[in-house]
Image (cartoon, grey):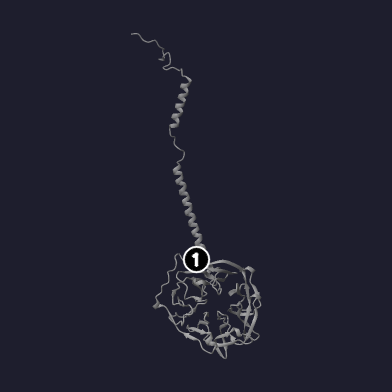
Amino acid sequence: MSRPVGRGDNRTGGPARPFAVTEDELEQAVREAFSRRVAVARPLAADPAGLAIRRADRARRRRTLAGVALAAVATVTVSAGMAQLGQQPGRPSQPTVVLGDPYASPLPDPTPQLSAAPRVDLGRGEVDLVVNDVLVTAAGQRLVLPGVAPVAERVQRLPDGAGWAVVGVPTAAGRSLWVVLPHGPTHLLLAGARDIALSPDGRQVAWREKAELVVAGIVGTQVVAAARTPAPAAAVPVGFVGDAVLVRLDPARPGHALWRPAAGPPRGAADGALHVYGTRPDGLAVALVSAASPRRSCLALLDPARDLAPVRKGCGPTLSGDGRGGVSADGRWLLANGTTGGRSGALLVDLDRLAPTPSARPAGPAVAGPVAWAPQGTAHYPDEAGALVRVEASRVSDGGTASVAPVTGLLPGQRPVPVGGDSR
């Protein structure tokens, strides 16, 4: 048997496969190697989904911690504010102006039980009347005033039958102003105001806010177009004279100022008026002015166009210094507390016969609240006993007396509040 001829180290004499490779075959082999390497999935250095989740968790934890911190700061702030209010229980530092209904939902449409409502003989139904928490209109409609009465100090009709403006009595939180709609909810316009004055037509309101006087218009259930001006510490708005706000500079001293927002700050007037009862249709203000004798008082008609300079003046009956009273819609009559002929009580003064001595007649018991004049020439007001007094000017001027109607169902310490403004 023959054996193949070979080398002693068991190596063959030539290669098992040829080394001759063409350029095309080498390029194809390189391409295949790179393709296989790209096709193999390599592990990522970081998981994108896990990274996003971890980042979201960290952001959520930061927001939670921030919310807790803000809640703690708010709690401390509110607590400090309440503590400050507790230390200073007097007048508020700033009122809240509410543009619209302050409640989350409107107050319910008032539907009181007529049998439970207070009763009063309104005679011919000439004025609206607030008794406790019920508004009784001249037409006989009864509306409950939730959250307003029995703390109503003054009530005035709004123009065009839009409802009623109700000014609350002063409290530790200040005064409030509400608007009551004829067939709708009750709206809060102002809260925490120091003093509130309404224009005779019910279209404007003025109030004291910290060191400023503010005047604004009343449109529906909103206060709009507010104007402000600095004012002395004791100055308060007490009414309107034409388009100007009547400002009492110091309640302890006579004298007023007129503020016309377009003309700048309030301008003092040497009127010497102790009280201004109201204005006449001719624009003149009816005021109680000081006289030479401390026991004597005078009535004067002041002209706002001349910085409240007196136009006519008459001294005679002694009028009370409480400032309670009101001027009739036609401007002829003044109903105010005073003394004449040794009798004290409400006096009816003929403003057309002012000088040299006013013509005054006893009209009824002393005025103990707002005076509301009806267009027919009758005045209504509450007396100290809580009865409703009706004064017919033509009858009293001829020597007649006023009629007194008791009001049943009044809460202790309450009096009826007649509504000012045109009730037609």
View extreme (top): residue:
2
Q: Residue beneath label 1, please?
A: 100
Q: Examine the image and state in which quarter residue 286 appears.
A: bottom right
Badge 1 amino acid: Gly
Q: Tell me residue 408's x, y (percent).
A: 43, 82
Q: Residues within 10 Å of mark 1 (few under 14, many from 20)?
A: some
**Circle 1 sits in a helix, a strand or a loop, which is it?**
loop
Work out whether residue 291 or residue 13 is closer to the camera in this orientation and state it.
291
Point out the residue furthest to the left here.
1
Q: Is 225 situated left or right of 38 in this image?
A: right
* Quadrant, the N terminus: top left
Q: Residue at x 45, y 27 (%)?
A: 33
**Nearest the eye: 149 or 37:** 149
Residue 364 position within the rendered picture, expressed as x and y whole percent measured from the top left: 52, 87
Query: Residue 134: where, in percent of width, then height?
Result: 44, 76
Most foreground residue, 273 or 375: 375
Q: Is residue 303 visible?
A: yes
**Residue 254 makes an appearance in the image:** no
Residue 379 percent location from the top left of the image: 52, 82
Q: Residue at x 60, y 67 (%)?
A: 228
Total number of numbered labels?
1
